[in-house]
Amino acid sequence: NAGVTQTPKFQVLKTGQSMTLQCAQDMNHEYMSWYRQDPGMGLRLIHYSVGAGITDQGEVPNGYNVSRSTTEDFPLRLLSAAPSQTSVYFCASSWGQGVPEAFFGQGTRLTVV
Amino acid sequence: GESVGLHLPTLSVQEGDNSIINCAYSNSASDYFIWYKQESGKGPQFIIDIRSNMDKRQGQRVTVLLNKTVKHLSLQIAATQPGDSAVYFCAETSGNQFYFGTGTSLTVIP
């Protein structure tokens, strides 16, 4: 059972480049979310989805786009990378909205130079 | 906005002792309070949660206490083991959004 899979694990981008962080889960979870983790800041919610076709903004959505065309996949897009987006990104999923137990991926370490 | 914090950024305990990790929160309307463990290089892992209408909940070697009067949450780990060394985050949720604290790094001394 793979759980939540994120790719890539590491990425270096130049300022202004775009890229997509992939997230897939095989647990048939309805709720999926993206967080960024910065030193001393804990995890901050970027975007979340309560089901296929439904997405919403979290605490720090600026500079990021998401879509949810299937239950399994929830990609995070950076349209024009900035050094401030250097961070570790985590994708998580859970059975539904309001469910406290979330399953996290291994993370993507992104550096924007 | 929401505010979830932790009292100490680091904590060292002897193997076999009990550990207590504390957290303060600001949103009295949260439905659940949650503890996660994050080992180096890995994603956070769910430990235990407590519903807002409860005061105490026990799991395997862990106990979570919720004091709504002073908006305080604690995680107690019994007989701490080397495998418990990690960063521990408290979090709260009401609806679709989760808010995490900044984490306490627990080091277990053999």
Image (spheres, helix red, strand yellow):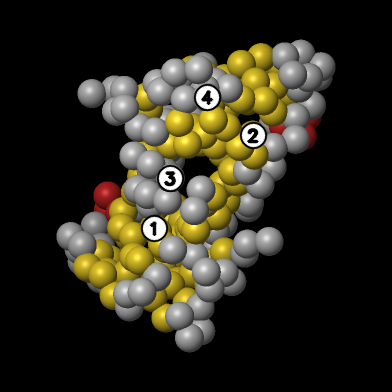
Q: Are marks 3 and 4 in contact (CB under 8 Å)?
A: no
Residue at position x 78%, y 19% from top? A80
Q: Which residue is mark 3?
A: A97
Q: Secondary structure at mark 3?
A: loop
Q: For the residue marked with disc 1, what is the amino acid?
A: Trp
Q: Are marks 2 and 1 in contact (CB under 8 Å)?
A: no
Asked whether A92 or A109 is in front, the reply is A92
Q: Secondary structure at mark 4?
A: loop
- Marked residue nearer the N-terminal end (3 or 4): 4
Q: Are marks 1 and 4 in contact (CB under 8 Å)?
A: no
User: How many dots with numbers?
Assistant: 4
Compared to residue B109, the image places residue A58 above or below, namely above
Residue at position x 43%, y 45% from top? A97
Residue at position x 69%, y 42% from top? A60
Q: For the residue marked with disc 4, what is the amino acid?
A: Gly
Q: Which residue is mark 2?
A: A87
Asked whether B78 or A106 is in front, the reply is A106
Left or right: A66 in relation to B24: right
Disc 3 packing (10 Å; few <14; some 14–19; many ≥20): many
Q: Secondary structure at mark 1?
A: strand
- Cα separation, mark 2 vs mark 1, equals 22 Å
Compared to residue B13, the image places residue B83 above or below, namely above
- Cα separation, mark 3 vs mark 4, equals 15 Å
Q: Which residue is mark 4?
A: A53
- Marked residue nearer the N-terminal end (3 or 2): 2
Q: Quadrant of the N terminus of chain B?
A: bottom right
- Cα separation, mark 1 vs mark 3, equals 18 Å
Q: Which residue is mark 1?
A: B35
Compared to residue B80, the image places residue B26 above or below, namely below
